[in-house]
Image (tube, helix red, strand yellow):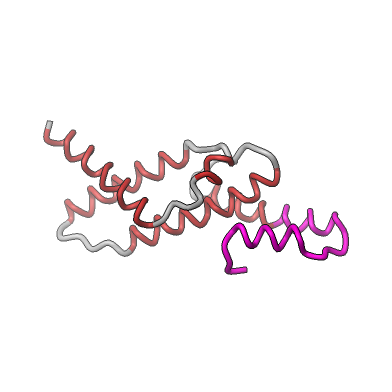
Amino acid sequence: MYDSPEKCLWLIDNKDWYCDSCRKEYLDKKTAALSKANASLGFPPLTGTPKRIAWAEKIRAELINKANYLNQGLNHDDEAEKALSDKAFLLFFQEWEKETDAIWWIDNRTTNVRDISIRIKEIIDIISYKLRS
């Protein structure tokens, strides 16, 4: 499924499942796989209802991919600039690691690469200011 998370959930909810236990088993497997992948990146388990957690795990994985895509696409003029950028991304991911409520991820599902780059720039500005002080 390469559609939006909302459409994917709608399709799953409205699919003509053979039985409810098959549907639940499918969702549980998908959620467990995403939880494991996110945990391997250092993200803690999410809290909330099972349905919210399932949706939020998918959203979180997509947002992590967007941030990694942005980071990999950056060109740096020198090693100092690269080090500053790496530090900013580390701090950015630490902010996200603190968000364990599934509803936060659902509320922020429309975050795009531009939003992420704006936040990274803010973090770089804070780091630069502290280095000058």
Q: In front here: 42 or 10? A: 10
**x, y percentage for residue 15?**
77, 64
Q: Is residue 126 left or right of residue 21?
A: left
Q: Is residue 119 above or below residue 72?
A: above
In magenta, the rendered stretch is: 1-29
Indicate yes or no whether the magenta region holds residue 25: yes
Residue depicted at 79% across the width and 58% down the height: 23
Residue depicted at 79% across the width and 53% down the height: 24
**x, y percentage for residue 110?**
47, 52
Indicate yes or no whether the magenta region holds residue 109: no
Q: Is residue 100 above or below residue 113?
A: above
**x, y percentage for residue 50?**
70, 43
Q: Residue furthest left?
A: 132
Q: Is residue 77 above or below residue 108?
A: below
**x, y percentage for residue 100?**
54, 37
Q: Main secondary structure of the magenta part?
A: helix
Q: Residue furthest bottom?
A: 2
Question: How many numbered dots are placed on residues in this image?
Answer: 0
Quadrant in which the N terminus is drawn: bottom right
